């Protein structure tokens, strides 16, 4: 493949991923509102378009047309870049997520991943750690007590859930022998890792729920106590950017769960990309279901859970996995 | 050993609690929704629902209001104002009568205060306006045909008292007495 051809293909892939992702994030909002409605015996949004299918467009237009308020005492620069930071890191993580096996078009092999980094897993971990800067800086720069409390909670949560999140993935790396997400999926050709690593899956899932900052771990934006937490002072498109970040993050966690534990694009009968989309949607559905089911924890309870339960369990899981692999 | 059993029991009880919550929520996905989609489906409201206020008429078609100011006095937000006046036949009536619906809280105290059952609240609650001044209703906007909830009542009709040869309601211009034990709306 020539150089220019490669760049064109790369840009096409990036555009496709970005468009699909933002579309999915927008419709994830609709899905969430619909599902929450159904869970609460309501129809959910059904006025804009057939079955409310144009609701995301109406929401987007509304957000675009709203005034972008910057509080007088806010730390201007940080206030402006914080939402972008959050959305950027979550979008960036999709660069290493493989969507299907290599395509062969006209003798050219085109991998269905933007960049198959050999440290892809580490990059995702790093990006998810940077993502919390969006929360912390945005909350601090707003110069509001609610935002600051939300930011503190976000940072405190991050140091708790990051450890079990990473440790839960160590057995996956041990089993597949690679940090590359494509290799991890290929290692699950025969069976998905959830069958051999149910504990790691559970640990990853709970940590991922915390990572997504949603019920029952939505302390940074606990609306009952903190109004909207770290994004209390945001409005208009910047608020929408936080929202996009949150919902893309839901899709990202779905994709990561699919890649690490559910066997990625592998599956019978259906084309790989369809299998992958189905597997991506499992986690967001579960997250929304959780939001309708569980109350919020206190953040010291989350720290207790992460440090005293999840982390030791994850370490134990690594040791047991290692023992089995050696023996 | 008993500690471990107790811990395991606690763990399973907690897990069951969470699983029950999830299942309960999931079951709602398949239940009939309770929402009534409003503009398409309008629920039949009870006759005594308190919404837009009207002034009603006697069975003869004369206006009932005698401009006694009791509704205006009873109104907790002072949204009713009027000017009383004497008609040619000697009866009092309102020269003008005004209700500011932008202030009205639809408490129904005016209806309770009214001795002639003239002022009544109707179930028509959906009368939004694009301008707050349009909420000021004058007498001609308030007056309706008919007697509303009490179509047969007339304040000036009476049955008198039993006196001399004639019993109750037997003299000219008198009506037979109302059965007060069967007088519910």
Image: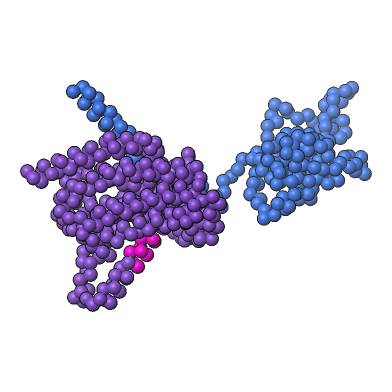
As rendered, which of A278 and B155 lies closer to the eye?
A278
Classify residue B43 as left or right of residue A34.
right
Q: Residue B111: horizontal and vertical position, in percent?
A: 73, 37
Answer left or right for A250 relative to B70: left
**What colour do you see for chain B?**
blue
Closer to the camera in the image, A92 or A13 = A92
Please say whether residue A165 is visible from this viewpoint.
yes
Would you say residue A275 is visible in this rendering? no
- Name the image quarter holding residue B2: top left
Q: Position of residue B136 (x, y in %)?
A: 75, 49
Q: Is residue A289 above or below residue A88?
A: above
Rendered shade, chain A: purple
Tell me if residue B62 comes above or below residue A301 in the rendering: below
Residue name at image x 54 percent, y 55 percent: A69
Tell me if residue A103 comes above or below residue A215 in the rendering. below
Q: Main secondary structure of the magenta part?
A: helix
Residue A83 position in % (x across, y down): 43, 55
- Magenta residue span: A15-24
Question: Residue B177: percent from the left, percent from the top?
Answer: 78, 29
Q: Residue at x 34, y 47 (%)?
A: A211
- Front residue of this view, candidates B120 and A326: A326
Residue at 30% from the left image edge and 32% from the top image edge: B14
In magenta stretch: residue B115: no
């Amino acid at each position: 493949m020539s150089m220019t051809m490669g760049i064109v293909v790369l840009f096409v892939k990036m555009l496709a991923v970005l468009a699909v992702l933002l579309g999915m994030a927008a419709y994830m909002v609709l899905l969430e509102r619909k599902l929450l409605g159904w869970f609460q015996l309501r129809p959910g949004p059904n006025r804009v378009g057939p079955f409310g299918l144009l609701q995301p467009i109406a929401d987007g237009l509304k957000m675009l047309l709203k005034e972008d308020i910057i509080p007088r005492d806010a730390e201007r620069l940080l206030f402006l870049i914080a939402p972008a930071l959050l959305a950027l890191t979550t979008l960036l993580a999709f660069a290493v997520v493989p969507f299907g096996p290599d395509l062969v078009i006209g003798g050219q092999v085109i991998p269905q991943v933007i960049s198959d980094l050999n440290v892809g897993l580490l990059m995702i971990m790093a990006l998810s750690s940077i993502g919390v800067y969006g929360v912390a800086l945005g909350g601090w720069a707003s110069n509001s007590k609610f935002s600051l409390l939300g930011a503190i909670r976000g940072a405190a949560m991050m140091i708790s859930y990051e450890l079990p999140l990473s440790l839960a993935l160590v057995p996956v790396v041990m089993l597949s022998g690679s940090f590359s997400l494509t290799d991890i999926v290929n290692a699950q050709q025969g069976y998905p890792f959830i069958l051999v690593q149910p504990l790691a899956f559970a640990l990853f899932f709970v940590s991922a729920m915390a990572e997504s900052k949603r019920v029952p771990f939505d302390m940074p934006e606990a609306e009952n106590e903190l109004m909207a937490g770290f994004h209390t002072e945001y409005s208009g498109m910047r608020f929408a950017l936080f929202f996009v970040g949150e919902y893309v993050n839901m899709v990202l966690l779905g994709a990561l769960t699919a890649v690490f534990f559910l066997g990625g694009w592998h599956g019978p009968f259906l084309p790989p990309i369809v299998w992958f989309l189905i597997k991506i949607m499992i986690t967001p559905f579960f997250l929304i279901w959780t939001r309708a089911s569980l109350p919020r924890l206190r953040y010291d309870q989350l720290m207790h859970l992460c440090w005293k339960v999840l982390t030791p369990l994850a370490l134990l899981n690594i040791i047991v996995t290692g023992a089995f692999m050696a023996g | 050993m008993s500690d471990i059993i107790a811990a395991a029991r606690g763990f399973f009880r907690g897990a069951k609690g969470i699983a029950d919550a999830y299942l309960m929520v999931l079951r709602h996905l398949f239940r009939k929704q309770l929402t009534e989609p409003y503009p398409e489906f309008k629920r039949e409201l009870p006759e005594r629902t308190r919404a837009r206020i009207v002034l009603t008429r006697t069975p003869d078609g004369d206006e009932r209001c005698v401009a006694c100011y009791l509704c205006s006095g009873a109104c907790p937000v002072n949204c009713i104002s009027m000017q009383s006046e004497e008609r040619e036949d000697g009866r009092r009536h309102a020269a003008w009568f005004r209700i500011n619906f932008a202030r009205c809280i639809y408490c129904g105290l005016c209806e309770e205060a009214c001795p002639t059952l003239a002022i009544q609240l109707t179930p028509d609650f959906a009368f939004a306006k694009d301008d707050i001044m349009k909420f000021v209703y004058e007498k001609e906007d308030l007056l309706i045909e008919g007697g509303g909830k009490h179509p047969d009542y007339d304040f000036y009709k009476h049955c008198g008292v039993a006196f001399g040869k004639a019993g109750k309601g037997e003299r000219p211009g008198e009506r037979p007495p109302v059965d007060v034990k069967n007088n519910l709306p």
